[in-house]
Image: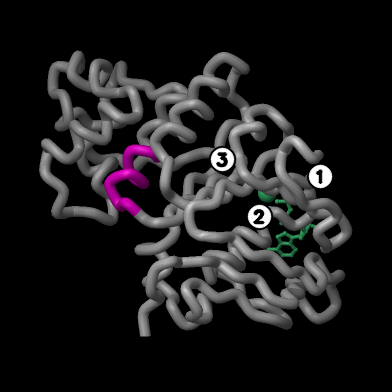
């Protein structure tokens, strides 16, 4: 059975450890992520943020407890989770193929018009239009280098084309300079309006734009509230 809207993600009594003899990374975690909610997940390095992200996507199975999307256990959805949750990782990967194929990855039916439209939304249309081969440019072609910020924008374009109801960003701005980072956060927030956003971050920049912030510490939710409350 496929999950129905409203696609609320519900984490119930979740515990996780990577192996029997390893320490528990998450302990009895409870969390509801409502459809359309913008959630920031903070916590120091090693606190389990990426582990939680992988559990939410069904890539890892809980040791105890359950995660459901629209009432369906995410671990039974497997590859179908990709239709519901789009992910942008810290260092978005570009494939050795044309620009258009990089953007419509996982969405091969998209037309060039569709691709131009999302490139415009992420602020890359002018740049790509200025390339002699445009969308047909090979990404590894001599002379064409994408900066960190541009890679993230291409990754966002991919996600916008997939049009998943939920988008998960795992520290998407690490390593960018402050100006590029701010511009990217603004683009993410504008373009992901109406979608559920789960944004893992290690600092506070931009979090005034989310609805809810949680802190993970020692495997548990240490604090939970609106950005103003924290
Ligand atoms: P960061 O901010 O550095 O990305 P994080 O909050 O995302 O950290 P996780 O990557 O979720 O933290 O790691 C949580 C804990 O689980 C850490 O102690 C880490 O060493 C451990 N861990 C992560 N991945 C594995 C794995 N594949 N096998 C065993 N232990 C792991
Ligand atoms: Mg991490």
SS of the residue under disc 1: loop
Task: Using a 10 Å C-alpha cutoff, classify the residue at mark 2 as few (fewer than 14 neighbours), some (14 to 19) or many (20 or more).
Answer: some
**The C terminus appears in which quarter of the rendering?**
top right
Q: Which residues are magenta?
A: 155-163
Q: Nearer the viewer, mark 3 or mark 1?
A: 1
Ligand 1 sits in which quadrant?
A: bottom right
Q: Main secondary structure of the magenta part?
A: helix
Within 8 Å: ligand 2 and the Cβ of disc 3? yes
Q: In the displayed structure, would residue 69 be above or below residue 100?
A: below
In three-dimensional space, the C-alpha distance between marks 3 and 1, rounded to whole angstroms, equals 16 Å
Q: Write the residue at 75% across / 35% down.
A: 228
Residue 83: image quadrant is: bottom left
Write down the residue under mark 1.
Answer: 44
Going from N to C along the chain, the mark reached first, 2 or 1, is 1
Determine if the C-beta at disc 1 is less than 8 A from ligand 1.
yes
Q: Earlier in the sequence, mark 3 or mark 1?
A: 1
Identify the mark at residue 50; answer none if there is no mark: 2
**Which SS class for mark 3?**
loop
* Vertical comparison of 120 with 21: above or below: above
């Amino acid at each position: 059975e496929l999950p129905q809207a409203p696609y609320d993600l519900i984490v119930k009594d979740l515990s996780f450890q990577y192996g029997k003899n390893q320490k528990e990374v998450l302990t009895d975690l409870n969390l509801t992520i409502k459809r359309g909610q913008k959630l920031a997940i903070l916590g120091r390095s090693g606190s389990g943020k990426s582990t939680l992200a992988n559990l939410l996507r069904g890539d890892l199975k809980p040791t105890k407890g359950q995660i459901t999307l629209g009432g369906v256990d995410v671990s039974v959805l497997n590859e179908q989770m990709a239709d519901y949750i789009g992910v942008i990782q810290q260092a978005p990967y570009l494939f050795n193929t044309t620009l258009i194929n990089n953007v419509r990855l996982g969405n091969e039916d998209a037309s060039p018009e569709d691709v131009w439209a999302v490139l415009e939304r992420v602020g890359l249309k002018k740049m790509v239009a200025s390339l002699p081969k445009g969308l047909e440019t090979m990404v590894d072609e001599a002379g064409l280098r994408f900066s960190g910020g541009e890679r993230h924008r291409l990754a966002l374009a991919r996600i916008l084309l997939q049009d998943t109801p939920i988008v998960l960003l795992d520290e998407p701005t690490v390593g960018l300079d402050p100006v590029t980072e701010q511009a990217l956060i603004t683009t993410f927030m504008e373009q992901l309006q109406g979608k559920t956003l789960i944004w893992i971050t290690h600092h506070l920049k931009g979090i005034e734009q989310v609805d809810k912030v949680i802190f993970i510490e020692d495997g548990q939710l240490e604090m939970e509230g609106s950005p103003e409350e924290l």
